[in-house]
Image (spheres, grey):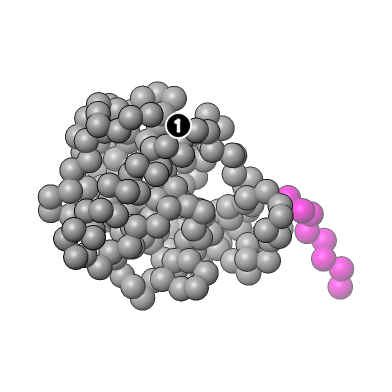
Amino acid sequence: MEDMTTEEERIYTIEDYHALSDDGPRMELIDGKFYQMASPLTDHQLILVELTRIIGNYINKKGGSCKVIPGPFAVEFPKETKKKTGYFTEDSVVEPDISVICDPDKLTSRGCTGAPDWIIEIVSPGSASHDLIRKLGLYTEGGVRDYWIIDLPKQRILVYRRTKDGAYDLEIYGMQDRIKAVIYDDLVIDFSAIEL
């Protein structure tokens, strides 16, 4: 029998994501659909490098076991590992700007399987709806404990924190604020000290 699904209707899998050519555009898979990633701007990369350094230095100084990994780095949310809310029902593979993973069993040779403890996304002009809607839904459904969205165009930082009952609280900060990381007792990032 002939496959009657169109390209728009096709549901892609984690294996389809890993079969993509390294020469092609960078893609993310969310709920079985591919989305092309925009090339990051200079400010995006500068803040990514600085935050990775700050978090990595903190973990090293404390002798912590968590790993901070900047993108591109594949984080897989297989459909069977997500909450059964019906919002996301298919495989997803994304490349967060920064992932902090404290469970070594989630790390594989291909990336991370399951929710990192902390994800930071840095919004570029072309990625706002992707980070603020699609990825927010995926990360909260997937169980990420702390999700920070650094919205450079709007000069704000949105922090979604999982509560004990599994819901998420939203805190909004400016680019000059100090923000405490929820997964560490004494890590506070002073954004006023980050020069772009």
What residue span does the magenta drawing correspond to?
1-9
Viewer-closest of 23 and 18? 23
Residue 134 in the figure: left or right of residue 141? right
Q: How crowded is mark 1: few (under 14 residues within 10 Å), some or many (20 or more)?
A: some
* Residue 185 vs residue 61, the one in the foreground: 61
Q: Is mark 1 on a helix, strand or loop?
A: helix
> Does 64 sit above or below residue 188?
below
> Going 29% across and 54% down the picture, which residue do you hit?
56
State the quadrant of the C terminus: top left
Q: Which amino acid does label 1 sit on?
A: Asp
Q: Taken as a whole, is the magenta stretch helix, strand or loop?
A: loop
Residue 120, horizontal then vertical, whole percent: 37, 46
Q: Can residue 113 be seen in this view?
A: yes
Q: Name the residue under label 1.
A: 43
Picture coordinates of residue 82, whole percent (x, y): 43, 63
Residue lying at 44% horizontally and 48% vertically, measured from the top left = 97
Q: In the rendered picture of this protein, how many numbered marks are placed on residues?
A: 1
